[in-house]
Amino acid sequence: MSVLTDLIKEFKSGSLDFEASFNYAILCSKFLLNSEMEEQGRRIIINVLDNWDKIDENTYEIWTDLIESAGFYPYLEKEKNRLNFKNTAGEIRKEFHKSKYLKEYFHEEQIVIREILSSEKNVIVSAPTSFGKSLLIDEVVASKKYKNIVVIIPTLALIDETRRRLQKYRKIYRLIVRTTQRPSKERGNLFLLTAERVMEYSGLPKIDFFVIDEFYKLSAKRDEERSDVLNNAFNLLLTEHQAKFYLLGPNIDEISDGFAEKYNAEFYLTLYSLVDNRQINMYSEEFGDRGRKRKNKEKTLFDLLLNLRNEQTIIYCRSPALVRDLSRRFCNFLKENGTVAQEKLSIIEWLNENVDPKWSLIDCLNHGIGIHDGALSKHITISIIDYFNLNKLKYLFCTTTIIEGVNTSAKNVVFFSRTKGRNKPIDYFDYCNIKGRSGRMMVHYVGRIFNLNKPPEREIISVDIPFFEQNPVSDEVLININEEDVKNKETEQYIKLERIPEDQKAIFKKNGVSIWGQAKILSIINENYETKRNLLVWSGYPTFIQLKYVLQLAWDNLLKKSESKWPMTRDRIPVVTHQYQRYKNISVLVENVFEYMKEAPTNKNKSETEIYDEAIREAFQMLRRWFHYKIPKWLNVLNSLQKYVYESKGLPSGNYTYFSTQLESDFVRENLATLVEYGIPRSAIMKIEDRISESLDESEVLDEIKSKNIIETSNLLEYEKEKIKQNW
């Protein structure tokens, strides 16, 4: 047994007397001086901090010196009223670790990275989830060293969290989250964008510094759908803007050989953490995904969660469907075990009015259960995370969305599903990221992961960077690489791309989707420009026939083979899009999906409540993935292609921009669309729309709402008021 295991056992049994506490301190000191045992020494300190009242007070000063020796300066500051810190030299070192620009103390290894960032070098950091990598972004921003900064964020869902964290710098930087927002000439600009929006942004000023969060998504092996556009955005900022960069991500062992050397970067790999993630194995051969074994596993989960009811717990599930099903059944389990509904959250009134009182999520929220699965409206997702972080929810059932940069403060994580989706196994990298959500720096010293599946075996995690390696490289990335940077110009792939006319190539590159899919669409439009003119040349809102034609052109040619299409089909996509265009209401969409699903043979044995829950999930999935992301992107691609063909023939072209922008921003007026990005419900925006001038710049809208006290003089629900106030 290890020293750490012995110590944990002793803490469970009671307190440590002076001799035991002193002896453990001596062992810990030896571990910290041994590079192979250093991590074990830090974990001992973390567990001592977690059980501070159980060690002999006569050893407080010894342990405090060890805390300082380990470089845990944030904890020295956090616990300064409890610790016994009388080390003058240590006090000097502590002040050296204070941020130059923030009211924060850095730990030992954050200081190392800060120094690299302050040098001429770029930095690529692989560190545990609880390392505090994001704090270094704040330090760079607060330093005012760079005029224009881009922070590339993996998904739209995560932009708001970053924006809220950085909005305190609004006087220094204009915060830009949409491509319609123009940069400031007087102040600096802080662009918080997805990779897609970086590529779509017209007139991007000279960028001095950029950040890629979750940089492992550069690898097609880890994010096949979006890796192309992330590579292109990285390449653009690196080659055209010559900007410095900071890449951050967890649990990565190595990157493309030669990349760091070429781009004057340092790959910094560390296991340093201020949190101890403790594994508790509960898996059994009697657990499975079907029949009796499924019931055994589920009962074990529910009993465990009941025992953990005084702590916050995240439960990892493979899919949105399982998230909804399991959370609903657990809610029933709690009610059967005497749990009463808690104080109602303000969002519940909104859900009753704007979705449906029958939605099982309402019952779950009333019993301290939240969900997070990428298939909810942005403001609902943000609110659930906020409630969880404020300890107003105890349980969070989630998919892999929770491991991609959302900050939570859960004491416990349950590894319930062994796959992503139905068939793709959770690998070691995914497991480490799930485990990393247990515990939280400055919140929980020790986090626990309860394994209801056998954890994957340790493996080396390597991240390839396709635009640099170019072996293999997709057409969509290769076409964006400068000629002098192409490593092999003799390949059939490169020669074929070079045959594309330059004017067409420019359009294909900017659109950033399937090169040959775009080429095929261009050919179809060219061949049919006269006969299909009434279907292709339109502006404003399209008719159903026009919408059907362009969306099915996109469906046939722009989807990747491996891309998830659920819950959409080729025939269904124009129908539901037209319905939402007409009614602009999630409740109507839910009802239409419900009627559609009731007729499905696969649902004949389900209750109406179960089908309704699935209809709500599917409607929100359509809204989030298709109406707010995929379809607007396709419309912009088709728009550029039809425009090219008709203008080249001297004929009037269509303009799909208005409709695509409206769809992406949920049919909110242009100068109010930023409010959607800020996590304010569409219902609230519609209620205050007529109080705000259409000519007002979008950057001034929130100030106008505040100065005119519009939220108190409008018929807003309490929840809607809260969501607006959160952005002041």
Image: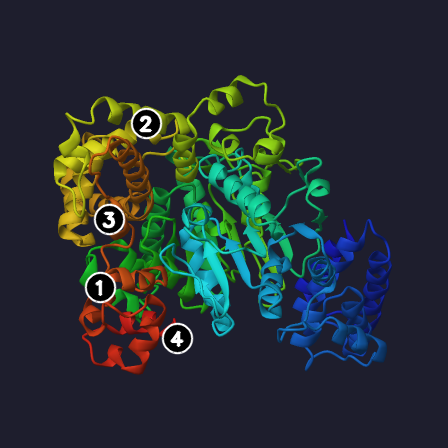
Residue picked out by circle 2: 557
> Left or right: 352 with respect to 344?
left
Disc 4 residue type (three-letter): Trp
Residue at (41% x, 29% y) in the render: 515
Q: Are marks 1 and 2 in contact (CB under 8 Å)?
A: no
Q: Nearer the viewer, mark 3 or mark 2?
A: 2
**Visible in this render: residue 599?**
no
Q: Which mark is residue 616?
A: 3
Disc 4, SS: loop
Q: Position of residue 589 (x, y in %)?
A: 18, 48
Q: Which residue is mark 1?
A: 683
Residue behind mark 4: 728
Q: Give the quarter of the figure containing the C terminus.
A: bottom left
Identity of the residue drawn at 78% across and 58% down: 41
Alpha-carbon distance for marks 1 and 2? 35 Å
Marks 4/3: CA distance? 31 Å
Along the polypeptide, which appears first: circle 4 or circle 1? 1
Q: Give the distance between the C-alpha atoms of the residues marked 2 and 4, in whole angstroms.
A: 44 Å
